[in-house]
Image: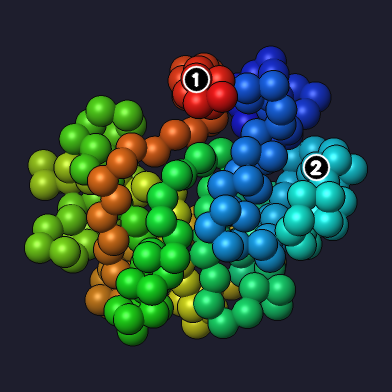
Amino acid sequence: MATRLRPITEKIPKLLVEVAGEPFFSHQIRLLKAAGLTRLVLCIGYLGEKIVEVYRDGSKWGVQIEYVFDGPKLLGTAGALIKALPKLGDAFYVLYGDSYLPVNYAAVGDFFLKSGRLGLMTVYGNHGRYDTSNVWFEDGEIKLYDKKNKVPQMQYIDYGLGVFHAAAFDGFPRDAVVDLAEVQKSLVQRGQLAGYEIKQRFYEIGSHEGLRELDALLRARR
């Protein structure tokens, strides 16, 4: 619902919020296309039809876009992915709709495939700087991931980019509200969530502060 960005998001969804003179999703598309990721599946809910009106099938941007709507009830971050599984294939990247992540996507994907695990979480040594740290990452392994219950060893944060095999979502209900954190915690407990450390910071438009920061960054790059 993008409540933290109101009043901007009272009439438009987060992906259409203007950043550096154009909708945020245009910046995401450019980033993904440069990484060779050209088949995009959007899980959308709140005011999602406005996104379809602007981006259609993606051909104008040189990508292929498909859409999966939550429906009358918002399904949560994993519930939406579960509904989209028929379009996602066996293995796929997952990127939050408000994250701008200038990273080496191919390297992340290669690491995931070589790990032989069901999922991968990118992590960043946050140390409480940009948001609340929620990952205990040590010796190249995710020891604990929890958004609610903190321990002192949590010095990292979920960077916002994941990779999954479809089987990672086995056993979770269909057409129900499921948070991606539940799936990730389950994978950690089973030793099935690889951790990939990212050294450069993340950017996001989930808050007014984050929006201003990314806007300044992209304008400066021009």
Percent of width and height locating residue 171: 50, 80
Residue type at numbered disc 1: Ala
Residue plotted at (58% across, 62% down): 36
Label disc, if present, on residue 220 of the rendered structure: 1
Mark 2 vs mark 1, CA separation in Å: 27 Å
Question: Quadrant of the image for the C terminus?
Answer: top right
Mark 2 Cα within 10 Å, few/some/many (few <14, many 20+)? many
Residue type at numbered disc 2: Ile
Q: Quick one: 70 or 52, which is closer to the camera?
A: 52
Q: Quick one: 60 or 100, which is closer to the camera?
A: 60
Q: In the picture provided, is 183 more to the left or to the right than 74?
A: left
Question: Quadrant of the image for the N terminus?
Answer: top right
Q: Is residue 118 above or below residue 95?
A: below
Percent of width and height locating residue 111: 33, 72
Q: In the picture provided, is 82 more to the left or to the right than 191?
A: right
Tell me where residue 110 sits by quadrant: bottom left
Q: In the picture provided, is 27 more to the left or to the right than 154?
A: right
Residue plotted at (50% across, 26% down): 221
Q: In the image, which is nearer the foreground, mark 2 or mark 1?
A: 1
> Mark 1 or mark 2, which is nearer the start of the sequence?
2
Residue plotted at (17% across, 45% down): 154
- What residue sits right under mark 2 in the picture? 51
Q: Quick one: 220 or 119, which is closer to the camera?
A: 220
Give the farthest residue toward the front: 222
Percent of width and height locating residue 158: 35, 49
Regarding residue 21, the answer to whether it shows in the image is yes
Indicate the secondary structure of the residue bearing disc 2: helix
Residue plotted at (76% across, 56% down): 62
